Amino acid sequence: MRSLIDIKELSLEELDSLINTALDIIANPSKYNEKCRGKKLATLFFEPSTRTRLSFEAAMYELGGNVLGFSEASSSSSAKGESVADTAKMISCYADIIAMRHPKEGAPLVASMNATIPVVNAGDGGHNHPTQTLADLLTIKRKKGRFNNLTIGLCGDLKFGRTVHSLISAMSRYEGIKFVLISPTELQIPGYVKTEVLDKNGIEYVETTDLVGAMPELDILYMTRVQKERFFNEEDYLRLKDSYILDLAKLSNAKKDLCIMHPLPRVNEISVKVDSDPRACYFEQALNGKYMRMALILMLLGIK
Ligand code: CP
């Protein structure tokens, strides 16, 4: 029985296999619509979500399975004080696989240690978001056709942005990757990501506050929202929230084949006028998340 808590638990071969399954699902959806008949996915969301929860649910339905769960902590017995460990034990009696989002870093790991069914980390605090990375990888594969030799700009809240931490972890395993880390000084990438991932893998990176200056060399620009829910005081959030707003003018010196990504939700860090630019990939990225979650459910349930 296997869970997915951190993207680095998947080997490069397994990532390739998940991507190939997702591409086959896109090409031949009817082949998959009975694969999970009789199986149940439990979505345990202790924190708000639109894409992750609903794409997990759509994924299970499109595989012929069923879904149960809750979308806020207040409607579960955690509101009465039940622990994550006990919740995981109980849900193991009712479902075949769990997708869990939690504001506390490490909560899905605790769940996986107590469940008797696979647990997928659907985002834990400011830590990791491995299935968002699966969506990101399929998007990069479909748009750029490769994972090697890419210059990737990550822009916005790199401190609390769990999607960024997971994406750096995944992309640091490929050849010829350079990261341009664009953020206000207060929201720079955490030290542990630099030492344990970037430095450890000998990955080239620069830190800058200048989005426009970085733009010409980027193959991928990954914008992120400033994470209001992770700030200790509103004053700091208000001061930093509009640090970067991507608009068409800022894209004037970008590559013609730039891929603009964003895990979403967007607040105002990408102007809606960018949405119709052919380089905008973020809505397709969200759709890719459903296909990769279908592939992941099949893998963790051991279904061919
Ligand atoms: N990208 C992402 O995790 O979106 P949600 O918070 O809507 O699930």
Image (tube, helix red, strand yellow):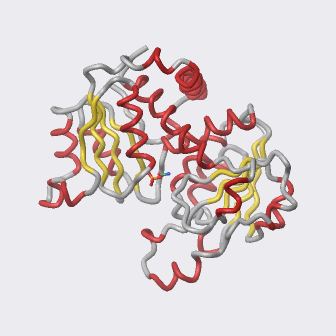
**Which quarter of the picture shows residue 121?**
top left
Q: Nearer the viewer, residue 172 or 50?
A: 50
Which quadrant holds the C terminus? top left
Q: Is residue 243 left or right of residue 89?
A: right
Q: Which residue is rendered at x = 61% and y = 54% of the image?
A: 262
The image shows residue 122, relative to residue 272, as above or below, that is above
The image shows residue 36, relative to residue 260, as above or below, that is above
- Residue 199 on image: x %, y %: 68, 51
**Which quarter of the picture shows residue 210?**
bottom right
Q: Which residue is rendered at x = 34% and y = 41% of the image?
A: 99
- Residue 218 on image: x %, y %: 80, 52
Q: Is residue 86 left or right of residue 148?
A: left
- Residue 239 on image: x %, y %: 57, 83
Which quadrant holds the N terminus? top left
**Which quarter of the picture shows residue 232?**
bottom left
The image shows residue 187, relative to residue 71, as above or below, that is below
- Residue 57 on image: x %, y %: 36, 38
Q: Which residue is rendered at x = 17% and y = 61% of the image?
A: 79
Q: Is residue 109 left or right of residue 249?
A: left
How many numbered marks, from 0 up?
0
Q: Which residue is rendered at x = 41% and y = 23% of the image?
A: 298
Q: Is residue 75 left or right of residue 246?
A: left
Outermost residue, left side? 80
